[in-house]
Each structure stands twice: as structure tokens, then as C-alpha cells.
Image (cartoon, rainbow, N blue to C red):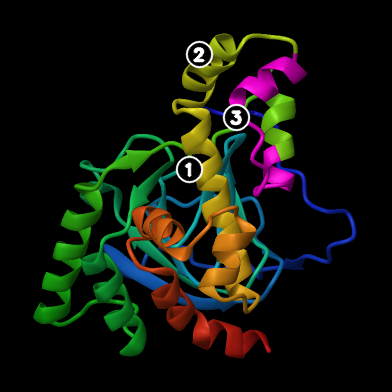
Amino acid sequence: MSTNNRHQRPKKTTWHLHPRLDIQQAPSDVFMNFEAFVSNTETRVHSHPWGQVQLISGGILEMEAEGTRFLAPPHLAIWVPAGTTHRSYNRRPIEYCSLNIDMSLTEAFPAKTSLISVTPIITAIIEDFRLRQIGIPETEKDQRLIQVLLDQLSAQEVEQHFIPVSQHKYLAPVLAYVEVYPADNTSLKEWAQRVHTTERTLARYCQTELGMSFTEWRLRVRYLYSMELLRNGRSVKQVALTLGYRQASPFISMFKKYAGITPEQYKYRLLPVIQDES
């Protein structure tokens, strides 16, 4: 499901334009670029003659690729095929890695910009290269690691959007409200009454327009919101209560479903990024 609306950013936000990397020719069939992006960084509109996987830790990466908005928390990477025009934003500090891949090695990757699940193996290999400051795999050992990395990435489940949007007259006001107030517990039946339709009709449009139920969509919004609350120092219990849970365990289960780790593990991983921010 594609969205052709422009991503709206707060007018008062001061955005930092990331300097363009002047790479005329790829130094290797596969090479990596590691950076630490400060809050409110955006890149210029650009494209590459090679495929690119963008991976992050710490925050959320937002991207526009050929008129479509993509939003990736750390458990998802963004795959950008060769020649695809795109630009990205991050509202909070992130540790960033771009994995650049020659077209001859990307036949098993999606034909269009997509979100790819990030497994623990992918995370471990990327972190190993980051810690060793390896941008170009030159040794036989590192080249084997790259092959494992490419095999892992090309074999993962693909999503078009983590938080799909819709301009449908019934859905648009509902989705806009929930994005602003993620903890709101208004039922689908109540929303249907507010937008003057039936619950069944609204549920059907959720499936056709979003590709998922309203409950699933709202859970994903809450998951992203919980990441923000955890980053701001809230305890797991406080976040659970804020989101309407009576106890922490259901929230922990929800968070782990998407992130693959618990909220406490996520907070631990955030420590270096939060320290850089302060």
C-alpha cells in the first residue's frame, strides 16, 4: 500500500542538512558507512547506482522514496533499490549504517523500496563491523560475514509500511487522531459513530486500505510511542500505565512482539545514544 502525501514536519523544528557523501564510484561490491546522526537530521534528495540497506539503532528513521513514506524502528531496515530517489529524516539521535550493495548481488532483494526485518544475526554482524571500524570487507573472514549478512537480509519477511496511512474519508480522521493520542482507547464502534458509518464498514476499510485491523494498527502506533517514552526516562511500568495497560506484562509482550527484545533491553541499548544526546 503506497502513500502519496508529503510527510509533514513541525514548522518550528530546525533541521540539520546532512552533507552529501561525494562517492563517484563504489570502492567495493559491498561497502558500509557508519555515522551518528544528531536530532532532526535530514538528507538531500538523492539516488545511488547501487542498492542500499539502511539500518539504525536508538530511534526511528523516516524516509520518502518516490513519493512514498517509510518509517523504520530499529527492528526494521529500509531497502532502497539502485536508482531510487529518496531522502530521510530522524527526529532523535540514531546510530546509522548504510550497507551499499552492487546491483549484481541484489537479485534476491525486493524490486521496490521495502522494510526488511532485522534479525539478531544481522544486528550482531553490523555491530561487529561498526566496532572494528570496517567499511570495506577485505579479509576472507569479513567477506564471509558479508555473504551471511546478504543471505540473511534477502531471506527476511518484507513489509511495505510499518504504519500505513490512508486518505479515505472515514479512516483519515481516525488515524490522524490516534497518531497524536496513541493512548486513546476509543473503540472502533465509537469511531464508526463519529465518522457516520458502521463498525463493519470501518473494519473493512482498515483491511483494504491499511492491510491490517484497527487493533493491530493502533498497537504499532503505541509501540513507537512507547519507544519515545522509554527514551525520555520513563520506567517500563510507567509506560505500560500511560498506554492503558493495568500491568506491565502485557505491554512487555507487545513490545517484544515488534522489537524482538524487552523494553528493559531496549533501554540498555539506548544508553550510548542517550549519553551522546546529553
Identify the image quadrant of residue 43: bottom right
Residue 168 in view of the camera: no
In the picture of the structure, the residue carrying the numbered disc 2 is 204
- 119 vs 177: above or below: below
Question: Residue 6's x, y, as percent?
Answer: 72, 37
- Asked if residue 73 lies left or right of residue 105, the reply is right
In the picture of the structure, the residue carrying the numbered disc 3 is 3
Q: Amino acid at mark 3?
A: Thr
- 185 vs 121: above or below: above
Question: Residue 151's x, y, as percent?
Answer: 16, 55
SS label for mark 1: loop
Mark 3 and mark 1 residues within 8 Å of each other at the beta carbon: no
Q: CA distance from mark 1 to mark 2?
A: 19 Å
Which residue shows up at 21% across the image and 63% down it? 149
- The magenta span reads 178-195
Q: Amino acid at mark 1?
A: Phe
